[in-house]
Amino acid sequence: MADSYQFGPFLVDRTRYCVNRVDRVVELTPKLLDLLFHLLDHSGKLVTKEQLLDAVWPNANVTDNALAQAISELRQALGDDAATPQFIKTVARRGYRFIAPVTRVDVAAASGAATPAGDGAAAPGQAIAVLEFANVSGDQDAAWLAAGLSETVTGDLRALGRFRVVDRSRVAESIRRTDGSVAAVAADLDAPYVVAGSFQRQGDQIRITARIINTRSGEAVAEAKIDGLVAEIFALQDRVVEQFARQLGIADVAGSRSRAARDTPSLAAYRAFTEGWLHLETLDIRETPHAIAKFERAIEIDPHYALAYSGLANAQVAVYEETRARNAPERAMLASAIANARRAVQLDDALAEAHATLAFALVSDWATAEALPSARRAVALEPANWRHFFRLGHAAWGDERLRAAEHTLALYPDFAFAHFQTAMVHVARGHLRDAEIVLRQGAAVQDRQVSRGDRYPALGLHWLLGLVRMAEGDAEEALRELDREQQLAQPHRLYGREYEMYAIHGRGACLLSIGRLEEAAACFGRALSIYPDHAPSTLGSAVALRAIGAHDQAEAALDKARTILDTLRTARPIEAAMVRGQMLAVDGRWQEADAVLCAALDGAPPGFAGWTIPIEPLLRHGSAPGLSDALRRLGERAR
């Protein structure tokens, strides 16, 4: 077996376990790398499905569908096309063949990379994690610099193009779930290199020290020691990576590095922004007002600070999203968020975070046609940032969303919500089995995140899996999944109350479907105690009450549902159409329900409107003849 292969523009290095295309790393998950290596080891030959499953998934119960999905993901990463393949050809019903000319190469000669002498030298494309800088002096007034320094060094290293830099949020999660040592974090993140640093402030002076450590040998391959004034912190931060670059033999091109700390000349504004972001990234709704205050303070100090406007917009979107399940959400807050994101773009059109934030806010406003190019612009500006791919997936639909989710997971394998994004497309297409596979993967990640106390624990995976299992006729497992979602939905987290309510509502619908009517009515009542004007729970309550003979209460609930519907038509028209369709469906007026949903889909902006139709419990109530036209149109939209 060769250590390295070259084909087309790609260099595949087994020793360093990476794939490079010209001067950039191709992000592949470990399974996809193993799959590629096996195909290359047998290039030109037919490799059967059974051989690939045995080689890449030994002793695992994996289906042909999983292999086909992995091949599809690998092709997309390489820019290959199944219809006119350059690299991987499908041999119908048998397996796959790698058809491109493959050359076995010496990796050092092929890379042409300048590396310093010594076995510990940092190799191109390998992962590096930046630990939070230690506050040696314990000066609480300077504590915010710990995050600021690590964020800036992370961005600067990424811009050098030499390393695959682990996102700071993933590093923070790793520190929390391990003992925080260099060795433990490196092993947890599979990062051969770690930056460990500290700072010490004395009056107006500061000393910054940092090392790049080869965690396998324990050797420091580069070191930096910087002294200067706190007021000159921007220039001092730059010098850390400049010293690293010189020692590693990397050309440090001026102006190519991250601008996260340098689009304001004000240290006070930078501090306010950093403190605001630390509040916001907790995803704790109790912290959001503090984040808004800090971002507003940064803007007050420097009205031209683009990143602060973007931060403020993110915080305001979070406020809106927390109210999105209400019949009258915080529209004014969303409008302000969009205005602030536009201001950030206006101030700095090269700021990827501004474009990504604008895209996220526009999707909340259903302006998906405008959101999509903004998200694509963010990815083009910073193609190694998982947050931008996540927001692209949020704005996109169909195949583009699936590709964006794949990129998100390649950059951040434990970001479970990317599985949710993918499953939404499969549900809309009516491919519930595919949705179930993805959701089981995502739910497992969600459970790990919650148990470890990770920074970005997902919500909704168990809820959605519960609805899929209900649609597939497995009420027992559906109830288990919905109960699990309710257990995990912490009310103080962003979307926590919403998914708690959704889980209870879903449980009520499931109980209704299997004739446990009293329990169903009680569940709908519990859901309404969280969101008193939730239209589907009000409708579900009416159905359950009518079934147990409480006709007066049922009629009162229906009257309330009709009143709520009038409000929704103005504030949330797409939701109103869904509720109207459910009202018609529970009355057995399927043709009218189908027409209402079709009209809503025809008038909706591009994107995921109505994506839950195939699994919406109250659209499946009773002996449903189906919503054939609506399902067909929904599937067409999800291509």
Image (cartoon, rainbow, N blue to C red):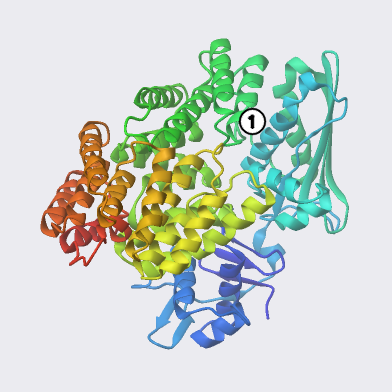
Residue 241 visible: yes
What percent of the width, then of the height, locates residue 325?
38, 38
479 w.r.t. 97: above or below: above
Which of 422/571 is in front? 571
Residue annotated with mark 1: 278
Mark 1: which secondary structure? Answer: helix
Q: Which of 324 and 13 is in front in this view?
A: 324
Are there few (<14), some (14-19), or many (20+) residues within 10 Å of tag 1? some
Number of labels in the image equals 1
Hey, which quadrant is residue 526 in on the image? Answer: top left
Q: Residue 261, percent across and down?
A: 63, 26
Q: Residue at left 68%, top 70%?
A: 14
Please identify the quadrant where the N terminus is shown: bottom right
In this picture, residue 363 sits left or right of residue 13: left
Q: Residue at x 58, y 58 (%)?
A: 445
From what the image shows, is residue 556 above or below residue 179?
Answer: above
User: What residue sits 66% from the left and 15% below the top?
Assistant: 268
Q: Quadrant of the C terminus?
A: bottom left
Would you say residue 48 is visible in this rendering?
no
Residue 126 in picture, x, y percent from top left: 69, 56
Q: In this view, does 156 lie above or below 336?
A: below
